[in-house]
Amino acid sequence: MAIYTYLLAYIFGHILTAHIVGRVFFRKNIFAEGSGNPGARNAGRSFGKKGFLFVLIGDMLKAILICWLADSLKMNFFQQTIVLLFVILGHMYPILYRFKGGKGVASFLGGILYISPLTALGMVITFLISYPFTKSFTKAGLFAIGLTPIFTFFIYHNLYASIIIFFIIILIILKHKE
């Protein structure tokens, strides 16, 4: 059952909200706008604040929904982190879009908010503390995201789940370096 859920999560990750919002509401192709990245930041630059919010919420919701499904199927915390990994892999490297997806931040935020609200709270606090020092939304956000494996370990004492979260963070950071 778990393998099917992981596969479904990867397929679910293919729902690139920025592509849908761009086509339906703005009659534009997000891949041809701004940086060409189908994520919330590029949608914000290309479609404005409403575009940013629609994409942010949509990408968060797809991760929340698939994590909720995993929770409903009585998957444990470790398995839920694997589900989160697969939805993010589907978002970052969708076969349908020739492996050109988003950077995974909104999906990560949605998934972590569902499976570990305390970790999400730690991220928010870290972001709020670090932003005045970095003066960069991206740097403060990546710093906060970078600490999530540590928060996860201290909250759940689950080394394997923390390693999966760490792997997700590495993927997000590598996507940002592209």
Image: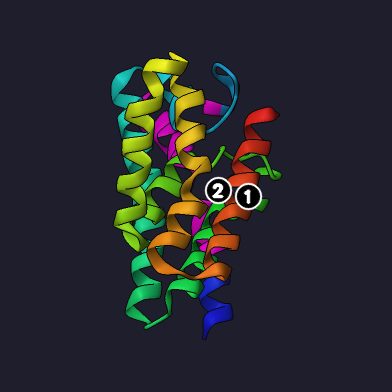
Amino acid type at circle 1 is: Pro
Task: Please state the extent of the stretch shown in magenta in the rendering.
Answer: 7-30
* Residue at x 58%, y 70% (from the top left corner): 160
Residue 89 placement (x, y as % from top left): 60, 53
Q: Residues within 10 Å of mark 1 (few under 14, many from 20)?
A: many
Residue 33 placement (x, y as % from top left): 54, 19
Residue 115 placement (x, y as % from top left): 36, 63
Amino acid type at circle 2 is: His
Name the residue carrying label 2: 91
Q: Residues within 10 Å of mark 2 (few under 14, many from 20)?
A: many
Quarter of the view holding residue 43: top left
* Residue at x 30%, y 46% (from the top left corner): 121
**Quick one: which residue is furthest to the top in this view?**
135
Name the residue carrying label 1: 94
Task: Check whether the beta carbons of the residues at disc 2 and disc 1 lie within 8 A of each other.
Answer: yes
Compared with 67, 20 (above or below) is above
Which label was assigned to residue 15?
none
Between 152 and 173, which is closer to the camera in this rendering? 152
Between 101 and 153, which is closer to the camera in this rendering? 153
